[in-house]
Amino acid sequence: MKPHVILLSSLLSCGVAGSWAGAQTDPFQRVAPAQTTPSLRGAPPTAAPASGAATSAGAPSSSGTLSLTGMADATFGLPRASSDGSLTRVVFDLAAGVTYQLTPTFGGLRIDVRGARVLPAVSARLGTSVAEYRAGGGQVTLVTPFPLSLTDGWRASETTVATGARVLIVEFAPTLAGGASPSQRAFVRATAAPVTPDARSVLSAPLSSVATVTAATATPEPPAAVPAPVLARPATPAPLPEGLPPGDAVSAAGRAATPPPAPALPGQESGKPSPLSGRAPGSPQAGAALTVPRLGKNPGLTRVVIDLPPGASYRMVPGGVGLRVELAGVSAAPQTGQNVSPELRAWRFEPTPEGVAVTLLTGTPLTSRSGGRAQLLPPAGGSERSRLAIDLAPALADLTPLTPRERVIAAVPPVPATRGTAILALSASLVQPRVVIDPGHGGRDPGAVGTITEKQVTLDVALRVRALLRAAGVDAVLTRETDTALHANKATDLELRARAGTPGTQLFLSIHVNALEAHSALRGYGVETWWNPNHPLSSSFAAIIQRSVVGVTGAFPRGLKGNRSLSVLRNSRVPAALVEIGYASHPVDGLNLQDENYLDRVALGVAQGIREALVSGVTAGGGAAGK
């Protein structure tokens, strides 16, 4: 026998190799299994420790953190993330001996970690509701495109997975409520909002009279540690009426209290795309220094004003998490401002060979037609500097008019009149495909009421969709053509709408407008599409509609929803979907819903989505339509 075989045999006989092999049963295991199972220690909350005080691993944290005992020299980070519509779930492995503290802020969730080394990492996007992940220096930050309170916008819990290890699960969504689980609430730290200048005057007074943010206030000192508060269990929301879309359950009082919109910029034309480049008039001034941006906040929107000296030029580059403004003909020292508003996470000045690069970190995608709007304004009285005014809001959509060519969709081929298998295809006549469009609400039922009334907007959009589809050879039928309901009883009304999909109907689409209560109105904006498992192709149809409407409008994508049984969908016998085209309760989205160009784009997106479903076989016929 060869020497190395003898050595291996002796190792096996001693059990060494057997122990090693047993530790490798998990092919993804990167370290030896822990010898001590992590155990939860219920440490009561106490006052925060003095600066620099150490907390021993396994002892109750003086700041009321969650403590576990076991393994030493642990690491924290490398989370696993997934998204379902607007819900993003982030999962962290919890090694033994780790303590942590959760701090919700208006910019996201901060996790302070003790007893483990935080693995340094930066990721631009973990999911729909986590715009950025930053880790290092004992801290993890999950940046969200919406503010968090102690109970709104997030939910955290711990659980034990099949392997026996414990994990921390944090979920984020604009409409999510709950905060930390009951066992964790003593370990959540509330922070005072950073002190930033109140710049509401930017939006209500002439831009020339706005106070300037100083470098000292641009990067505020972190707030002092405060004792962890005792959190009350959040009130359980009232159940929604069975079978109604989510926005329909908002009370009339909640609907009326819509936050005020930001005033328009002087001479603003929302029907024109933002110019991505330009130049301030006048002769260039060598070495002209750039002042820090002037900032103003309104509900759902933040305005940034950059004063450009004569001759300075700019070029804007929208991106996935913000806007880069490349300036030439100016100079500035490196500067930064943090946690300005929910719409503006941070701003930064960086000198370049040509001038200065200004980065505006928003946390949500920007394009040349959505997420932001810019305008170069002339100098105000007493100043020689032009004003580059940039409005940032994830709810800003494309309000530019459609061209005559864009208003026409391609023809849809006819379909066989009879779907029965007993009749030969050669003997079947061809007819226009039939689609039912359901404008939500009507008559005494107004639906969501805010900047607009839902029943009026849904009918308006449905009529536009019908015109587009009929011109393309589709038999588009509306459940209502006037301001009426199908029945005085709501449940009966919804059932009658769903039954409009009679035999021979290919698709059913219901159009609605969303809304939230006034206290959480700023969390709701954008387009979402619902489906129920009433038909095997309903989810595919909903996905096509969502993608098409968002693509044409540039609206914020809230994703697909299918976690509630909706009467108008579940009672339909054909592929069915319900699209929420915006929020009447949001100050920016409400303005979108008042805009004729936006409604045109919504209708075009719906019509193009229906056409795609018809020609690709996502219909009641399951593929009979020709491509």
Image (cartoon, rainbow, N blue to C red):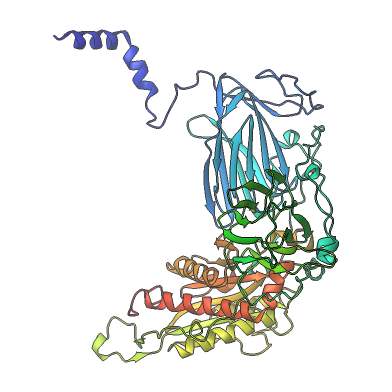
Q: Residue 333, position in %: x, y?
A: 69, 44
- At 65% from the left and 19% from the top, the residue drawn is 57
Residue 259 vs 154, above or below: the answer is: below
Residue 189 vs 523, above or below: the answer is: above
Q: Is residue 18 left or right of residue 328?
A: left
Residue 315: name its quadrant.
bottom right
Q: Residue 572, position in %: x, y?
A: 51, 75
Q: Is residue 486 left or right of residue 306?
A: left
Q: Looking at this view, is 236 or 402 the one in front?
A: 402
- At 42% from the left and 67% from the top, the residue drawn is 536
Residue 581: name its quadrant.
bottom right
Residue 6 vs 526, above or below: the answer is: above
Residue 182: name its quadrant.
top right
Q: Residue 519, position in %: x, y?
A: 79, 59
- At 58% from the left and 48% from the top, the residue drawn is 353
- At 55% from the left and 31% from the top, the residue drawn is 119
Q: Residue 105, position in %: x, y?
A: 73, 45
Residue 378 vs 180, above or below: the answer is: below
Q: Looking at this view, is 168 or 307 the one in front?
A: 307
